[in-house]
Image (cartoon, rainbow, N blue to C red):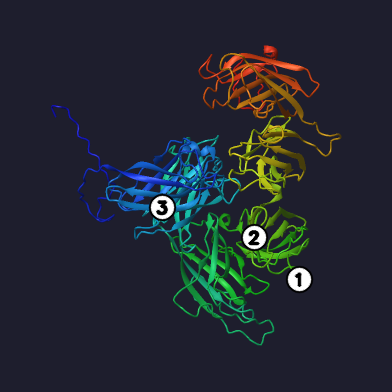
Amino acid sequence: DPGNTKLIIILPRFRWLDEGEDDGLIERDLTLEKDTPWKAYVTTGKDKKASTKARVVMVLYGEGDKTEEIPLGDGSKKYFKPGAIDEFEVMVPSGLGEPYKVRIGFTEEDQDQRPAWFLDKVVLEEQSENKEYEFIYNDWVKVTDDEDGWTEIPLEENTDIKLPVRTYKLEVYTGDQDHAGTDANVYLILHGERGDTGKRKLKRSNNRDKFEEGQCDIFELKAVDLGDLKKITVGHDGKGPGSGWFLDKVHVIEDHKDENSVTIFKCDQWLDEDDGDGLTERVLEPVKDDFTWKVWTVTGSDANAKEKSDADSKSKKKKSKKANKKDANYMKSEPPSGEVVIVVYGTKGKTEEIPLVNEKDNNFTEGQTDEFDITIPQNLGQVYKVRVGYGEDSSKHESWFLHTLILSCMKDKNEYTFELKDHLLKNDDADGWREIPVKPNTDDDEDEDKKQEPLQAYMYKVDVYTGIEKYSGTDANVYMTIYGTRGDTGKRKLLKSDNKDKFDEGQKDRFEIQAVDLGELRKLVVGHDGRGAGSGWFLEKIAVHNPKDETKQWDFPCNKWLDEDKDDGAIERELLVDDVIEDGEWRVFITTSNKANSDTDSQVFLTVFGDKGNSGPLPLGAPGGSFFQSGETDEFDIVLKPEDIGKIWKIRLEHDNRYEGCGWHAEQVVLENKKTSQTLTFPVNRWMDEDEEDGDIVREIAADWPEEEGDPPPATKYTIQTVTGSEFGAGTDAKVYITLYGKLGDSGRRRLNISDHKNKFEKGQTDTFSLEAIGLGPLEKVVIGHDQQGPGSGWYLDKVIVKEEDDGPEMIFPCDRWLDMDEDDHKTERELYLNGEPPEKNDDDADDDDDGDDEDDDGGNN
C-alpha cells in the first residue's frame, strides 16, 4: 500500500451469519446506508401546566433498525408550550423499516429537576415516501419517586402492526451474602424480539428500602410488546459508599401470560468495582436448564388415614383400604371441582402457584395415588414446606382429604415427603389452604449432622383492630399475607372471626391462620377487594401472637384508610413490624387550609432543624397538582437521624413557586416519631404567596415540646431596606433575594418581593421589605443577589439596612458595588458583613458551617 491509504468499511446492520440463528444465512450482501431526514411534529397538551423546559429525547423503533437518542429542542422556553405543535428535523437510518413504536423521555442530565410534561402525540413524516406515522399518548411524562421520565408509545394507525403496551413485573433478588445490598441507583434494560426498553431506572419497589440483603424487590415496567425476551442488561451507577451489589437473579413476569410463566435471568455475581471482575453492569440470558419434578398425591379419608400412612416413596406402590363408612369419624373425601395448586418453599426461594394436572380426568379420588409432572425453573435449595390449596376455578365448598404428598427432583434425585392426613376444607369459614412441613429423614444410615430438624405447623392467632373513626368498618373481603424470616403464608382470606360481624367500627376481630413456622415476623400485606357499598376500611393495627410463646406478639401499626376515596386511595398496605422501626423514622402530615385558592402545584420542601444540625431541604410529594389540595392532609415518610439532627427545635416550610399563581396557604405541619408515636405540631396558618401578606413563600415555626413549660419562641420580624445607588443604570428589574446569617443560624434564601414602592430597586431609591425567621441570634452577615433576568439586569447596591422588630437598632451592611455580569468583577451575588467587618472566628467554630445553606462564602465584602 504505497499511499498508506486505509479503507474503513462500516457494516450498517447487526445480523447473524449462523445456520442456527436468524434466517440461517451465513453470507450477506451489505450496502452502504445513509441516514435520511424525517420531520417530527410533537404536540403538547393544552393545560397551562403542560409545558416543560427540560430537554426531551426520542428513540424511534422500526422493523429493521432503531435510532439513537434524538434530541428534540434544546431545553429553551420556546419549545413544548401548552397547545403548541413543535416541528423538528430528525435523521433516521434508511434501513429503519416500518416504524412500530417511539420511546420518549427526558435527558439524564435534566431528570434531577423532576420535570413533568403533558404529551398529546407525536407525528413522524417520512418525506421521501410521503408517509405519516402517528403515535397518540395524551398523558403525562414525568419524573417522580415512582416514575423514571420515560414512556413508550405504539404506532396508532396506517399499518397492520398494532402492538399493545405490556406491563412487565420484575422480581429482583439480592443475595444473602454480607453487605450484598446497595443504595446505588439500579437500572435495567429488557431486550426482546421487538427491540428493547432502553435504560430504565428501578424506582418504586414493594419494599421501602430497595435492594437489601436477602430481599426480593418487585417493580413494574411498561413497554410496547417486546415479544419473547432474549436477554436483560442490569447495572448501577456506583453512587454512595459501599455501592457494590450482589445480584442473585431477576424474574420477569408478563401481564398477558400465565403468572406461572416466568423468565429467569440468573446472575449470582457481584456488581462491584472492588470485587470480582469489577463490573457494575451485566448482560444476563434466560435460564434454559429447568428442573423437572415428579409429584405424587395420596388421597385418603378420616376413617382410613392410619391405614394409608405407610406410603412407600421408594417403590411408589401405594396401598389403600376401603373406608369404613359406618365409622362415626368418617368424612367423605370429595374430589376437587377445579384445580389443585401447590407452592414449594426451599432455602433458596419459592415457586409460584403450580397447578397439578395430567391427562387423567379422575384425579384425587378417594384411596387413589395420582402422579404429576411439574417444572420448577429455579434451584430451590433444601425444600422445607409446601402450601396446598385450590385454584381460582374451584367451588365455594371443597373437602378433599390429602393424606400424603411426595416431591421428587429428577435432576438430583432428592425426594421430600409431606404428610397431612386431613381435609383441605373450603367453605364460609375456611379458605382451603394448608401448609405442610417436610417429613424429617429418619434413615439410620444418614449422617447425624445432615438430618433435618423437624419444623412444626402452627395456628397463628391474628388480632385485627378496626379504627373508631366514623364509617371505619367494612363488609369487603379482607386478605393478608404474613412474611417472616422463614417464608410467608401466601395470600389468605380472613373468614372466621370470633365476632359474628367482622371488621365493625372500633372492634377487635381474632382469626387463625395455619402455617409452618415462619420464624421471626418482619412484615405483612393486608388489603380487601373493594366490594360492597362503603367498602372503605380504617385499620388501626394488626397483632400476631407468637405460637411458641403466648406472652409475646408482633405488632403491625397502620392507622390509615384502605379506601379508594381517602388518603392515597390504596386498598392494600404493607405493614412493618413495630420493633424494626429504627430511630429517626418520622411521618409528616401537612394540612392545606380550606381557604379559596389555598392549594398549590409547586414542589414543597421541608427543612428540620435540631440542636446538632439540619436535614437540608427535603422534597415532599411532586409538583403538578396531586398533592396539597384545599382542605386535604398529605402524608410523607422522612428520616431524621438523631446523631445528625439532635432534638428538633424548628422547621422551615417553603415551595419553589414554579408556576404562575401557585401560592399556598398551609394550616399546620405535624411530625410523628414512628417508633415512639410522639408528635410535634407546628401551626402555620399563613400564606406562602408572592401576592399575599408579606409576599414570602418561606415560613419558619418553632417546635413546641409537650413536656416543656412555656410557649415556643415566636418568629422574629426583620425589616430590610435596600438602598440602590445613584449611578447611571443603577436600578434593576431582576428578582432579588437575600439570606440573613446570625450567630445561631440562617433564614434561608428569601425573595424580596413586596416593597413599599410599586417599582422596586429604582435608581437612588430605598425599598423596605419584611421577613420572619426563628433563632438566628445576633446578625453577622447577609448574602444578597439577583437572578440576572431581563435586559439591563445589573444593579448597583449601596447598602442593606436590617432592623430587628420595630424597636431594634439599625444594622448596616455596606456594599457600594455593582451586582452585574458586565461590570466590576462580574458577580451578581455579594456577601456583606455587619458594618463591613467580618466577624472574628475562634478555633472552636473556625470549621463550623452547619447552617444548611447552599451559598458559597466569598469572604469579605465582595
Neighbour tally class for label 1: few under 14, some 14-19, many 20 plus, Cα within 10 Å: few
Residue at which label 2 appears = 527
Q: Nearer the viewer, mark 2 or mark 3?
A: 3
Task: Look at the numbered disc 1 and give the secondary structure of its residue.
Answer: loop
Q: Nearer the viewer, residue 127 or 845?
A: 127
Q: Are marks 2 and 1 in contact (CB under 8 Å)?
A: no
The single residue placed furthest to the front in the displayed view is 758
| Picture coordinates of residue 109, whole percent (x, y) | 48, 36
Q: CA distance from mark 3 to mark 1?
A: 55 Å
Q: Nearer the viewer, mark 3 or mark 1?
A: 3
Q: Is residue 33 left or right of residue 846?
A: left
Task: Look at the numbered disc 3 and give the secondary structure of its residue.
Answer: strand
Question: At label 2, which amino acid type do we have?
Answer: Gly
| Picture coordinates of residue 288, whole percent (x, y) | 40, 57
The tag on residue 149 is: none
Mark 2 or mark 3: name the one nearer the start of the chain: 3
The single residue placed furthest to the bottom in the displayed view is 326
Question: At label 1, which amino acid type do we have?
Answer: Lys
| Picture coordinates of residue 543, whole percent (x, y) | 73, 57
Neighbour tally class for label 3: few under 14, some 14-19, many 20 plus, Cα within 10 Å: many
Task: Look at the numbered disc 2 and give the secondary structure of its residue.
Answer: strand
